[in-house]
Each structure stands twice: as structure tokens, then as C-alpha cells.
Amino acid sequence: MSDKIILTGATGLFGTNFIKCTKNINNLIFWGNKKKIKLKNIKIQYINLKNYSLVEKQISKLRPKTIIHAAAFTDVDDCEKNIYKAYSLNVSLTKNLVLLCKKYKIKMIYLSSDQIFSGNKKIYNEKSKIDPINIYGLTKSLGESIIVDQLKQYLILRTNFFGIGTRYRNSLSDFIIRNLRLKKKIFMYKNVYFNPLNVESLIQYILRLNKLNLKGIFNLGSDQKISKYKFALQIANEFKLDKEYIEPINIEKKINIAKRPLNMFLDNSKFKKNLKINKIPIKNQISDLRRAYERNR
């Protein structure tokens, strides 16, 4: 078997950043959605992942060692409105890839979510009970279950990340920076907590975990539990933007949105121990974001 790695979701938020961060790595194959914009100087195979026979034909030909499965329907609110689409993309599609990984003895790296928990605990580790409260979280947890049930070689990575997005897919940090630069008021939840990573850091951690040939479930996050409101304040400070346009609100004040866990704080000790990392301050992650913006000017 070759050392080839296939990345699904190459034109998404994670995928476009993965491509930027792996320019000097050989044997990478990018599978993307043909409906999305093409990336400059990057060869992407536009393949319908729902077409099982077509995907098998490609896998049989390429014989990859690893598939990084990042393709997903990730809009939490839209998943509630389009349950069939959420199940089709996040469960059925994942199952097809899992069956092919099993058949061709391929390792799967699955990008999961912190939305698979109810948010009622203070902190969640890899053994915490899965208890999703929205359709997105449910479908991602079902994807996890299929992988654990069918495969021996896998990495399930639960995470939440921010970074530079695309014209058609903005991240939370994009939303904050864009609106503050335009001097537009934004409403940020003061009672919703998470511990996200800069996407560039996340990608490097994934590559290191894979290189060590580790398997199982890992939480990937920064060290500090932070509200989305304070996260926005820290971004404003780092980018020297006016904090007066950031308005704190409780999530209960928002109507017509999917139910979300209030606490998504992931215990990151397992992955830090395996990668021999001492600290991952959220402040440093946001500083890295600013440097990424400067490189992309």
C-alpha cells in the first residue's frame, strides 16, 4: 500500500486550510465538491462521494493508506431544517467510506465535533457519554459509531476550530473580524463555552497524530474554557478592533435557531500527552490567526 492520503471536503473551511498547510507534502489527493469555487494552482478531484461505485473505483486505483474525512454538512441550523440531507451527508456518506476503508484496509481520520454532547457537564473527555441535543450532533455521533463498529484503524477527532475561511464558507472568527472592521454590531453568546483551536494548529496536530500511527478517539482543543463573547473580545484586542460593537447576550434570547449545548469544553489532556505538548493557550491561537491574516494580505 502507498503512503497516499485522500482528503474529503477539500473545498470546505478545513479543507482549504489543509491544502495551504501541506503544500510541501507529497502523495496528497484532494476530493472536493464540484459546486464550489476552484482553488488556484491546486488540483482537486471533483467527485460525488455519494456515488459508491465511483468512489470505490477511485480508491481501488489510488490505494491510499489514509482517508481524512472532513466532508460534512456542518451548518447546525440548516441540519434541523434539512434532516434528510444531514443524515445523507453525515451518516450515509460516512458509512460508505467506512465500508471501503474496511475492504481496502485504509485508516480513517474522522473530523468530529464538540456538538455530540448535551453540554450539561463541566468538561468532556474521550469516555464521556455521547448525548447530542441537535441533528448535527446526532449525525456526527452516528458517524463515530459506524467507524468504531467497523474499523480497527481509525482516528476520531472531536474539535472546534476557527481560521480564515472562503468566500462561500466563513468561520466564526471571520464573522467577528469582518463585522468589526465594518463597524457593525454583533451579538455574541456570553453563556456558551468552548475551547477552540486555530485551524492551522489543528492540521499540524492531526498530521502528527497520524505520523505516530495512533488510533482511537482524541479531543483536540485549546486549554482555556471561554465564552463566545470573550472569544470575540480577545479577537478584537488582537486585531486592534473596536470592542464597543460586540454585544453580549444569552443564547436563549435568540429565536429560530437549533438547540445548542451551553458547554462544549473538551478535555485535551490525552492528545497533549501523546504529542508531548505542555500548553495550548487560546491567546496564542488567536495570535496565530492574526499572523495568518497578515500572510494572506
Image (spheres, rainbow, N blue to C red):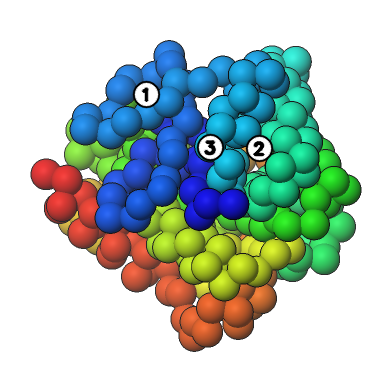
Q: Identify whether 75 is placed above or below 202.
A: above
In contact (CB < 8 Å): disc 1 and disc 2: no
Give the numbered dot on residue 168.
Answer: 1
Label 2 neighbour load within 10 Å: few <14, some 14-19, many 20+: few
Q: Residue at label 3?
A: 62
Is residue 107 something one can see in this rendering? yes
Is residue 158 something one can see in this rendering? no
Q: 240 or 29: which is nearer to us?
A: 29
Q: Position of residue 226 (x, y in %)?
A: 52, 62
User: What separation in Å lies between label 3 and label 2 (alpha carbons)?
Assistant: 49 Å
**Tag 1: residue type?**
Tyr
Q: Position of residue 139 (x, y in %)?
A: 76, 34
User: What separation in Å lies between label 3 and label 1 (alpha carbons)?
Assistant: 30 Å
User: What separation in Å lies between label 1 and label 2 (alpha carbons)?
Assistant: 28 Å
User: Under tag 2, what secondary structure?
Assistant: helix
**Circle nearer the viewer, 3 or 2:** 3
Label 3 neighbour load within 10 Å: few <14, some 14-19, many 20+: some
User: Under tag 1, what secondary structure?
Assistant: loop
Q: Identify whether 205 is placed above or below 256.
A: below
Instruction: Tell me which numbered mark, 1 or 2, is placed earlier along the sequence.
Output: 1
Q: Position of residue 143 (x, y in %)?
A: 76, 39
Q: Residue at x 43, y 36 (%)?
A: 30
**Quarter residue 16 falls in:** top left
Q: Residue at x 80, y 50 (%)?
A: 151
User: Under tag 3, what secondary structure?
Assistant: helix
Label 1 neighbour load within 10 Å: few <14, some 14-19, many 20+: few
**Circle nearer the viewer, 1 or 2:** 1
**Tag 3: residue type?**
Leu
